Amino acid sequence: MIIPPRRIWPLALLASAAIGLVLLIDGAGKSSASYDEVAYLRLAAQWWRTGDLETIGRMGSPLTFLKLQQAPALWFVDRTGRSGWIDDPIAHQALLLPMARIGALWLWGAGLVLTACWARSLYGPSAAAMAALLFALSPNLLAHGGLITMELPLLVFWTASVALFSRFLESGDRRAFLASSAAAGVAFSCKFTTILLPPILALGWLVDRRLRGDCRPIRLLLRVCSGMLAFVVVLLATDLLVTGFATMTPSARVGSEHPSLSGRFGPGVDGWLVRLAERRWPQDWVALAIQMIHQRSGGMSYLLGQRRSTGWWYYYLVALAVKVPLGVWLLFGGRAAAGVRGLRSGWRRPSSGEVLIAMSIGAMLVLTALGSKRNYGLRYLLPLAPSAIVWVSRLAEGPRGARALSAVGLLLMAVTVARCHPHELSYFNALAGGTAGGRFVLADSNLDWGQGARALARLQRIEPAYRDLTTYYFGDTDPGHYGVVGVRFVVDAAADHPGLPARFRAETRFVAVSASLQHGPWGPEGYFRALDGVPPDRLTDDGTIAIYRSDRVFGSEQVAAPGEAVLQPVGQLGDAADDHPGVRLEGGLGREVPDDDEIFLTPQHLDGEVPLDGHGVELQQRGPVPLVRRPAHRHQGDDRPVLPVGADVADVHRLVPLRRHRDVQPVAVSGRMGPKSGAFGELANHPRRIGVGRVGHLVGSQRLLGRLGIRLDRAQRQPAAGAEAGRGVVLPRASGADDRGEGHGERTPGGRTGRPRPSLPAEGRGRSSQDSPAPSG
């Protein structure tokens, strides 16, 4: 039995709504607050309690969007005994935000229905079914449909205005014209991008009438201008109605003088201008003026590895190329090819709706390319998505080949969403190399809008080693609200960052950095340059935060000043040696190192074991310390050396390399004790038996030696004395050594200081050539 299309499209609409809502509800609690969501949550709670919304106007934002989105959730929270969440929304944001997002999903549903109904009115029921499925399977619409930001409210009422204006052009129905104007007024009260809508609609009106054969351009122009003047009047009146006639003064503080006007035109004129400027105006109008000032001043943007405060004219073209799924581009190509075939078979005047769609998309792209100095994301083009979907949906009403192409495109969209859910906000197509490659193309709301804190917290719960973490997080809230532990630095979009350290540093085993800081526009210029060329140890599931091993990024911590305590061992200088045996240096060296008076430059790996590749200082005190290889090498069945360490610490003057196949581990041996002969059995490998003394700073071998005045390019070594300071060891700065040490390591292409190649004592050069070659002096 074949179901007729007129019965299929309602079923397709319901199925699309179910698919989209399930995805959105599932993802509501899997991401942290995106940028401004916390501010909107706080402002909505303040409005709910006090009715005050002037603060958001001072930010240069309209009023209505947060009422439409958050009123359902706030009402529910208040009625279910959770009023404390509203009283302190910041502290309860991890619980309140998912509820607010779910409460705002009715707007996404409204956009879905509008798009499907518009497609049906233009092309037919099959087109409506296809439009509904495309809307529900769009990663970008799912990404912003699940946030309490301005994008979805704007999209819904922008789409309603354009669809109603299309009906007015087709039928001449003035009720559709007035309804379109009113919808535009609500859109304006949701986001000020709506100021572009009247000129776009006017252009579509002019072109449509010219295509219909109106050959009186002056009369047509006057008619369109007068009509759009009425459109704007209704728009502004609707804005006043929906905002409750809210007003505010342009300046937060009002007085008899104005800093920009007083003294410029004379006493009489100045006073009149000041009174005019400081009177109360509709709040959205004042907020629009504030936003225009922000827009004129520009803002930091990021594109293809470059930062700029004035933007790029081609920014949105690049964003479309890498953020729109390839399945959509396939459908666009098929739709364009169908249009070309239609022109070859004979001219057919396009409908008013098709003209309006073409004009709105083209004009919006031109206006954003030429007029925007703040390139923050593809979301500024999101209102065009329903128009593009309706235009493409005509394929479903075409011949068999077009319908087959429609099915292939929808299948590709379904696969795309299945692969990127629930991280649709950070989606990039294959042209950008997916999310991992997208961080080198775009940033901010295209990738990392601050939504990655929950993903980082989940990773810390799954792999506890990542709890020893320093996080540089882009956003406007503390990621600790979502369970992130460790040292946290929050960097917002402000020009100044008073809480940020003077230089990029981390005293934890791992360091995590948000993509919008490392690659995007919001980190201080050059601040994260130490990460250039360093592969991350891990990316969060959504790709927004990269985690690095600190020893691979910094190599070590610098000793900031002469006499700074570097180690705080368990024990005192001069303590008696313990009874632990020494350790045999593997690889045919034929020597042993006594267990006392030793410092090992070995950082721990993720599972608490010690790798053979890195820098750091650990003073081991209790029991033998297993020195194992990388995780990939742990099941090869070879023996692994164990290095026990005593409490006494002496001055250091040379390095002895411990070799295991192609891994080299420098071991710092005390200046008064060299390698000794003897035969000791190897100790067993006990990864859990690690005793670690208190460590003040991690110090890599190259910089530690720099402090001691040792030059690696000379055979002669100059020992430096260690001085007792309570329970610590004080390493004095060597004369003439700069902050980075002299002659220690080579600069790699990524800008990091390479590992030093220490001289090997003469008695230790017994390594066979089949293993790693001995380092040169």
Image (tube, helix red, strand yellow):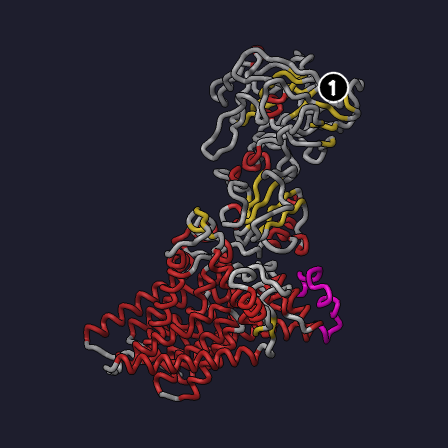
User: x, y percentage for residue 70?
Assistant: 62, 71
Is 87 covered by the magenta stretch?
Answer: yes
Q: Amino acid at mark 1?
A: Ala
Under circle 1, the secondary element is: strand
- Vertical placement of 655 versus 534: above or below? above
Camera-side residue of 4 and 319? 319
The reply, left or right, for residue 773 in relation to residue 30 is: left
Residue 85 drawn above or below residue 428: below
Is residue 12 in view? no
> Who is closer to the viewer here, 527 or 599?
527
Is residue 503 placed above or below 578 in the rendered structure?
Answer: below
> Residue 706, image x and y in percent?
59, 22
Tell which of 345 and 507 is nearer to you.
507
- Dot 1 corresponds to which residue? 723
Q: Residue at x 64, y 48 (%)?
A: 460
Chief secondary structure of the magenta span? helix
The total number of labels drawn is 1
Image-based side of 56 in relation to 575, left or right: left
Is residue 383 something one can see in this rendering? yes
Among the 4 quarters of the image, the one containing residue 78: bottom right
Q: Quadrant of residue 645?
A: top right
Q: Position of residue 50 (x, y in %)?
A: 70, 72
- 10 Å neighbourhood of mark 1: few (<14), some, or many (≥20)? some
The magenta segment = 77-99
